Image (spheres, rainbow, N blue to C red):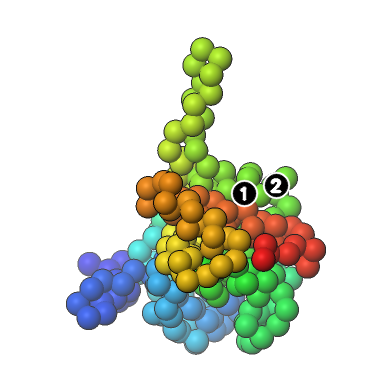
Amino acid sequence: MPRWGCESHQLFRKGRPVTILTVGVDLAKNVFAVHGRSEQGKAELLRPAVPRAKLLALIASLPPCVVAMEACSGADHWARQFAQFGHTLRLIAPKFVTSYRHTGPLGKDNPAQRLMRLGGVGQTTATAILAMIGNGHDFKCGRQSAAWLGLVPGQYSSGGMARLGRITEAGDAHLRILLGARAVLAAAKSKTDSISTWTFELEKSRCYWKTLGAIAAKNARMAWAVLAKGEAFRRPA
């Protein structure tokens, strides 16, 4: 039975369940806007005018997901309220929010738009990356950000020898899914750029799942470079 008496947002499309993975909340004094997207990046929950008295019940009715809000005076209060229902909270610095409010990352030259130049990274993924790692300055290099997302192999030492295991999967699973590995791999065979060539050769020498992990890790490292270096970053030709 849905919590707080609110309708469940476990949606169905053509008989298949659609789970909302990311939710953006535009905070205000009395009326809030809520925007939720599925794993496929489609807008599944659009509530442009949610009364203050009904906001908590709406968020409580959702399955655990990532909820992003602009960092402001009331954000901490709402973050504590939302967290009790199992949601993962992400507070975004205002400078990252204002650049794509109303027109979005497609309309202006901002970090989200630069992220979308990477293969397999669309609007939903770019926004999720910004919510997770901000400007990337918390990491010294791209490999650190990839490790934080659980996209590097675990290391095991014995007798002075270091062995690499499977990827740790220690970070956010939703963001790993959104990093576009399958899309990049599917498109690699019809392209001749350096990344597509690397991807194609990698698939021939490794199994499918290892190739996906390597592509996601490369995308995570390049995403860090886009955010940390800004316009100084140039995607390999």
Q: Secondary structure at mark 1?
A: helix
Residue depicted at x 73% and y 64%? 234
**Foreground of the two, 80 or 43:** 43
**Foreground of the two, 18 or 60:** 18
The x, y position of residue 131, in whole percent, is 60, 63
- Residue at far top of view: 159
The x, y position of residue 172, in whole percent, is 48, 52
Q: CA distance from mark 2 to mark 1?
A: 7 Å
Is residue 176 visible from the viewing direction of this image? Answer: no
Three-letter code, disc 2: Cys
Q: How packed is label 2: few (under 14 Cα within 10 Å), some, or many (20 or more)?
A: some
Above-or-below relation of 81 to 210:
below
Residue depicted at x 54% and y 56%? 198
**Foreground of the two, 79 or 186:** 186
Residue depicted at x 48% and y 51%? 202
Three-letter code, disc 1: Ser
Tag shown at residue 194: none
- Among the 4 quarters of the image, the one containing residue 8: bottom left
Quadrant where the image shows the N terminus = bottom left
Q: Secondary structure at mark 2?
A: loop
Above-or-below relation of 202 to 22:
above
Q: Which residue is mark 1?
A: 145
Q: How packed is label 1: few (under 14 Cα within 10 Å), some, or many (20 or more)?
A: many
- Residue at far left of view: 15
Q: Which residue is mark 2?
A: 141
- Among the 4 quarters of the image, the one containing residue 54: bottom left
Is residue 150 visible from the viewing direction of this image? Answer: yes
